[in-house]
Image: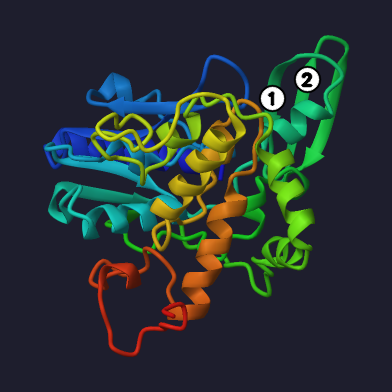
Amino acid sequence: MLSYTEKIREIAGRLLQSGAVEMVIGFRAGTVPMMNEPHFAKTPADVQKLVWDSHCGINLANYLTDRKEKIGVLAKGCDSRNIVTHIIENKIKREQLVIIGVPCKGMVDKRKIAMKAETEITEVIEAETTITAKGHGFSKTFEKKDVLQHNCSLCIHRNPVIHDEMVAPPVVEQQGVDRYADVRSIAAMTPEQRWKYFEDLLAPCIRCYACRNACPLCYCPTCFVDESRPQWVGKSLDPSDVRTFHFLRAYHCAGRCTDCGACERACPVGINMRTFTKKLEQDCLDLFGWEVGLDPEVRPPLDVYRPQDPNDFIK
């Protein structure tokens, strides 16, 4: 993916120079290693800051909500599926966008690398299949496949589902991936074991809302946790409030989550809140044959009514 950068700059420069777009949303190098940040390129000088590597995990669809400009946006597989959801939910118009498709081979998990580093990482060098982390007195090389984000290791939609231009030919999609092994392992627990599992999972939560803020689906003008008339949930660190926040947010993403991993990536204490959304993703697939964001012309199952919809839950 390192070869994408020059092509991205070429496409972005051409779109801006021709007036086809007012800005191109992509990535620039962050101020610390493995932390690239969103970049809004509006001039030729801005275009030269655009980069692409295995640290571009933020979902750029998050920056399209309710915008009015004509926008070029880089989109890997999960970003493109969230863009489809934005179009379906009338948060952006398709004609406003020039989607620059980026075939993805997965983003690396900075925590996996940091945990194996001997001291603070001051430099990261990426090759086609390896990542080398360096710090004071140490240098360690990792195979990319061994340090991918968990959601990326399970991804079967690495290529953009919609695009106007592509920076490279499509990559080969992963086959034979068991996407729901974790869900089944939790379902196999006893109720007591599951209760403890979720208590332990959410215990570190500090209610910073980084997961909500990073999620391209969380665009409500007033979040339910901020609603005061009536107040739906407390804002304390009481375990019941914490659980309510995570469970309700997950249900708001039901049938909409692309498993982009933005929530888990943003969490400062490393909570795997994808545990909740993966279960709902599996339910939508099993009950409705639904995979989110593959076609902007198809409404999601929770948005329509069909007489043959499953209704065994009605007593």
Residue at 58% over, 62% down: 279
Label 1 Cα crowd, 10 Å radius (few <14 / some 14-19 / many 20+) = some
- Please determine whether, in this image, residue 83 is positioned above or below residue 172: above
Q: Which residue is mark 1?
A: 124
Whether residue 311 sits left or right of residue 229 in the image: it is right
Circle 2 residue: 134
Q: Residue at x 38, y 40 (%)?
A: 60
Farthest-out residue, top: 136
Q: Residue at x 71, y 68 (%)?
A: 184
For the C terminus, which image quadrant? Answer: bottom left
Whether residue 240 is visible, yes or no, is: yes
Label 2 element class:
strand
Q: Say which element carries label 1.
A: strand
Q: Residue 148 vs residue 37: left or right?
A: right
Q: Is residue 166 left or right of residue 194?
A: left
- Mark positioned earlier in the residue sequence (2 or 1): 1
- Residue lying furthest bottom: 308
- Residue 227 position within the rendered picture, expressed as x and y whole percent measured from the top left: 30, 32
Task: Give the x, y percent position of residue 81.
Answer: 38, 58
Q: Is residue 304 left or right of residue 187?
A: left
Q: Residue 117 in the image: x percent, y percent? A: 83, 24
Q: Quadrant of the N terminus?
A: top right
- Amino acid on which disc 2 is placed: Lys
x and y percent of residue 294 in the render?
A: 37, 68
Would you say the residues marked 2 and 1 are in contact, meaning their CB atoms lie under 8 Å apart? yes
The CA distance from mark 2 to mark 1 is 6 Å
Q: Nearer the viewer, residue 242 or 89?
A: 242
Mark 1 belongs to which amino acid? Val
